[in-house]
Image (cartoon, rainbow, N blue to C red):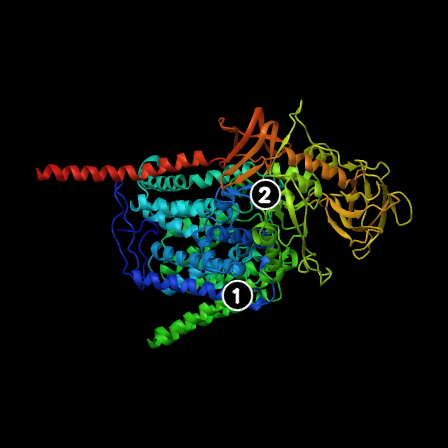
């Protein structure tokens, strides 16, 4: 029977399968799947795709001299800040060393929900492979996982192509590698390895949907759907949209038009489409326990930047089709020249049935246009404009181009006219791309011409093979085409590797710095009696996950709104628009959050090339209250104000700061600095990048008090005269993408005259209330009072915290953890109810005297997701169970 997906049989039978023919399916019959390529053919194609993809990927990294083939790091942006640390935390959990479990991550953000992060960053089965590597080779583990995901994407695509239409195995393998090595994979997903699960998902969902349309795999097909949605629901959503478009295009191209109105003509498609929708719905339902948790986690996360989509010029889009181009903000639609040329032949190849040819041409054009239109861009991204790269669905277009190339080749090698037409289109693309701004590199057109030359030489060798009936020229042609593919993709990888380092933050792989930090933390560890903070001078945005300890640092797409706002009110700093919370080196907040040990490291020389060398990390300790303390029940709910010094005192429950009223800022010429609308002082940058204007901040503090500077929107250096301490850096900008944390400057001199030299770099503002003078004696008294009234015993688990209180405790029990959604608490043996909050922290109101509190945590959405997953599982298993029981009953009746 004619293929459901590919239309009428080709005029020329493919090499590995004979052509088929027959009448179209009856309106009420389930269409049959086309003849499949033999298992050995499919295995060879998958192996070739995986091998070529890995070879090109590694070769490109080696050319760029990137880890693990050279001294340049791969840890750019979120790869170093998020993915490597989260995989390190997974390693710890798998080896029984982690602080926390599936529900709670006690290491980050003073206590964060871990299941949403697991579903976002670690849901892929490939992530479990980190357990096979040593802990100090975590960067290599993530690199190997990236390679394996890329190889798997190519292998599954090769399977899909041969299922779509049988053909030559080496061509399917090479095109599978073209898909795995598309520009989106090399430029974007290579340092966002969780997105590579979407690259695998697209062809896998096409395979599942193909079988569902043919009436097969209904129950089993839901399992791969659930797997890809669990692995990474974000790209799985895009892959699902793409697979549905691919499958429906094939279904419509195959459906022979009948008489009557459109509803009657389309009626035969109802049953296959319903089966497809059922498989997808059941698969997503099975994944609901994790997907619902991630979805609700995003609702409780600190809001990112709201941006409007702005399409890139079409010249930029066309330029990204060519090899050796790179840009962070334009769609990486590159596929190697061989695949691109074949895809461009599809509209002109008469061997492809007209309906199929027209349908696929329209599909590719429509998806390409959808990348550039705001409403469809919003639909591709689940109706939320992403921060950063705005073309995250580009891999779907890469899959369409590769599939179009296969359809043109598998229906019969394109002849001279289709090839000339495709060559003309490619020349027009190259000419238009030359007008793109800053995208064309010196090697772009030589790489393109080399690919075109390889195709021309391969065609001559193929003709020679046919003329002399000898396999050697044909084999040489295949080697030449694959060699050109590997060379172009390796060069594109190397270009992306090198250029990424120029405009993205980068982080060194695990080395001596991390090893020393980890050893110091292990020696100082005292959890849950107190926390050990990895320190203010961070190595990556998730230091606690990478080197250990329990700190404020936390960088995730799911960083809670309450954590970010609470730490900001206390003088904390953050980057990534509030979703990368930093450590706060302050004895008051250390007392509030029970940080009894703190690592002090020198600036990371990988981040700061001017950092002094030779300094060694060290640990400081202080006596702090337990994790659970008591506060008097206020008459009115307390609220934070504009001063972080007063906010710290409010949460501590004692006055410990003196806030000088004579703060003034003057320029190097002695004149007062200009005032900002909020009453602060403006510090503009110098006229050139290298100029460093200076300003002097003065204030009066009590003798021997500890001086702290709060300047969240200042970018520069501050040093207090006579303090004997090195200058401290502030990295706050405006408009706000990052704010600088409060920093200690040293002890006030005997005269009380505080002079802070400000060396302005990018400028900014300094608030009028920027100076706080901490009295150590008052702080010790406040800490002693909290210790005397605090918990006598604390037990922390993967799902909550329990504490024993002194007899007769009254007021509010405050837990040194953010009050994130999902907490339920009870006093003594009372009933658990939604937890109270106290200035952003977890709290339990003690209506009467109590001797204990118990708080349990369940991620929001878990109960709903479990119910949906159970319903989906029942919907899958009950029909099969019913059939088994009915068959058993029939056999019993037949026996009697």
Q: Nearer the viewer, residue 356 or 508?
A: 508
Would you place residue 459 above or below residue 200 in this image? below
Badge 2 marks a residue whose secondary structure is loop
Mark 2 or 1, nearer chain start:
1
Cα gap from disc 2 to disc 1, whole angstroms: 52 Å
Judged from the image, the secondary structure of the residue bearing numbered disc 1 is helix
Numbered label attached to residue 529: 2
Residue density around tag 2, few if under 14, some if 14–19, many if 20 or more, within 10 Å: some
Residue 179: percent from left, percent from top: 46, 58
Question: Which of the two marks, 2 or 1, is nearer to us in this view?
Answer: 2
Tell me if label 2 and label 1 are in contact, CB under 8 Å: no
Which residue corresponds to the image point at 37% horizontal and 76% vertical from the top-left? 472
Give the residue pinned by disc 1: 490
Q: Establish if 234 lies above or below 126.
A: above
* Residue furthest left as drawn: 896
Residue under the image location 49 percent in, 65 percent down: 56
User: Could you say where residue 80 lies in the image, as x and y percent from the top left?
Assistant: 58, 55
The x, y position of residue 32, in whole percent, is: 27, 48
Above or below, comparing residue 60 to residue 643 in the picture: below
Q: Which quadrant would residue 511 be assigned to in this image?
A: bottom right
Q: In which quarter of the image is the C terminus?
A: top left
Look at the image and tell me whether residue 485 can be seen.
no
Residue closest to the eye, 174 or 758? 758
Q: Which of 10 and 224 is in front in this view?
A: 224
Horizontal side of residue 555 vs 877, given as left or right: right
């Amino acid at each position: 029977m004619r293929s459901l997906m590919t239309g009428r049989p080709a005029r020329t039978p493919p090499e590995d399968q004979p052509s088929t023919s027959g009448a179209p399916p009856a309106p009420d019959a389930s269409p049959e799947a086309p003849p499949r390529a033999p298992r050995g053919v499919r295995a060879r194609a998958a192996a070739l795709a995986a091998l070529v993809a890995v070879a090109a990927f590694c070769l490109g990294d080696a050319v760029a001299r990137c880890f693990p083939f050279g001294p340049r790091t791969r840890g750019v942006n979120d790869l170093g800040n998020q993915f490597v640390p989260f995989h390190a935390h997974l390693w710890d959990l798998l080896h029984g060393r982690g602080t926390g479990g599936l529900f709670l991550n006690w290491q980050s953000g003073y206590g964060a929900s871990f299941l949403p992060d697991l579903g976002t960053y670690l849901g892929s089965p490939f992530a479990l492979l980190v357990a096979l590597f040593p802990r100090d080779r975590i960067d290599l583990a993530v690199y190997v996982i990236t390679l394996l995901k890329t190889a798997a994407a190519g292998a599954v695509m090769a399977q899909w192509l041969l299922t779509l239409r049988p053909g030559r195995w080496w061509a399917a393998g090479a095109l599978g590698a073209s898909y795995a090595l598309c520009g989106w994979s090399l430029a974007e997903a290579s340092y966002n390895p969780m997105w590579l699960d979407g690259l695998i998902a697209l062809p896998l969902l096409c395979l599942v949907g193909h079988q569902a349309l043919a009436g097969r795999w209904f129950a089993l097909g839901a399992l791969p759907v659930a797997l890809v949605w669990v692995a990474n629901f974000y790209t799985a959503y895009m892959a699902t949209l793409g697979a549905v478009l691919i499958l429906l295009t094939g279904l419509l191209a195959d459906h022979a038009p009948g008489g009557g109105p459109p509803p009657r003509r389309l009626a035969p498609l109802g049953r296959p489409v319903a089966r497809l929708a059922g498989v997808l719905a059941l698969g997503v339902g099975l994944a609901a326990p994790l997907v619902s948790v991630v979805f609700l986690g995003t609702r409780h996360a600190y809001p990112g930047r709201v941006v409007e989509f702005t399409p890139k010029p079409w010249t930029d889009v066309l330029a990204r089709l060519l090899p050796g181009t790179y840009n962070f903000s334009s769609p990486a639609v590159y596929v190697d020249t061989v695949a691109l040329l074949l895809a461009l032949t599809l509209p002109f190849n008469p061997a492809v049935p007209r309906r199929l040819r027209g349908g696929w041409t329209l599909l590719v054009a429509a998806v390409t246009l959808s990348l550039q239109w705001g409403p469809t861009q919003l639909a591709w991204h689940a109706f939320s404009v992403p921060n950063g790269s705005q073309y995250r669905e580009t891999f779907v277009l890469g899959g369409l181009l590769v599939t179009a190339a296969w359809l043109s080749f598998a229906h019969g090698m394109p002849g001279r006219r289709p090839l000339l037409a495709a060559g003309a289109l490619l020349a027009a693309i190259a000419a238009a791309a030359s007008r793109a701004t800053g995208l064309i590199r010196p090697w772009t057109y030589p790489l393109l011409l080399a690919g075109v030359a390889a195709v021309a030489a391969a065609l001559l060798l193929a003709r020679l093979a046919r003329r002399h009936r000898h396999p050697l020229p044909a084999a040489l042609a295949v080697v030449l085409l694959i060699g050109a593919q590997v060379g172009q993709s390796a060069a594109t990888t190397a270009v992306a590797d090198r250029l990424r380092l120029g405009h993205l933050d980068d982080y060194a792989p695990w080395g001596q710095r991390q090893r020393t930090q980890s050893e110091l933390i292990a020696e100082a560890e005292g959890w849950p009696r107190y926390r050990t903070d990895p320190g203010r001078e961070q190595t990556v945005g998730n230091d606690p996950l990478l080197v250990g300890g329990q700190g404020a640092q936390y960088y995730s797409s799911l960083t809670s709104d309450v954590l970010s706002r609470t730490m900001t009110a206390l003088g904390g700093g953050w980057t990534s628009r509030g979703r990368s919370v930093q450590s706060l080196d302050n004895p008051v907040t250390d007392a509030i959050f029970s940080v009894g040990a703190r690592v002090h490291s020198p600036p990371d020389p990988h981040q700061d090339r001017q950092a002094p060398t030779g300094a060694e990390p060290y640990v400081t300790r202080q006596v702090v209250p337990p994790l659970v303390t008591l506060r008097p029940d206020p008459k009115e709910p307390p609220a934070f104000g504009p001063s972080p010094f007063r906010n710290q005192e409010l949460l501590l429950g004692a006055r410990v700061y003196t806030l000088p009223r004579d703060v003034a800022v003057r320029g190097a010429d002695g004149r007062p600095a200009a005032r900002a609308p909020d009453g602060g002082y403006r510090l503009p940058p110098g006229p050139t990048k290298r100029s460093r204007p200076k300003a002097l901040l003065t204030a009066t503090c009590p003798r021997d008090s500890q001086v702290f500077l709060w300047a969240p929107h200042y970018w520069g250096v501050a040093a207090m005269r006579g303090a004997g301490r090195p200058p401290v850096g502030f990295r706050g900008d405006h408009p706000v993408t990052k704010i600088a944390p409060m920093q200690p400057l040293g002890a006030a001199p005997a005269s009380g005259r505080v002079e802070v030299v400000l060396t302005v770099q990018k400028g900014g503002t300094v608030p009028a209330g920027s100076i706080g003078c901490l009295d150590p004696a008052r702080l010790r008294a406040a800490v002693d009072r909290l210790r005397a009234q605090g918990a006598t015993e604390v037990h922390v688990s993967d799902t909550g915290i329990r504490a024993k209180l002194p007899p007769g405790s009254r007021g509010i029990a405050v837990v040194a953890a953010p009050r994130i959604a999902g907490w339920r608490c009870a006093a003594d043996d009372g009933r658990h109810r939604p937890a109270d909050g106290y200035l952003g922290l977890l709290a339990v109101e003690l209506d009467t005297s109590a001797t204990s509190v118990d708080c349990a945590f369940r991620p929001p959405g878990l109960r709903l997701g479990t119910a949906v997953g159970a319903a989906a599982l029942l919907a899958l298993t009950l029909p099969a169970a019913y059939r088994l029981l009915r068959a058993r009953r029939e056999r019993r009746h037949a026996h009697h």
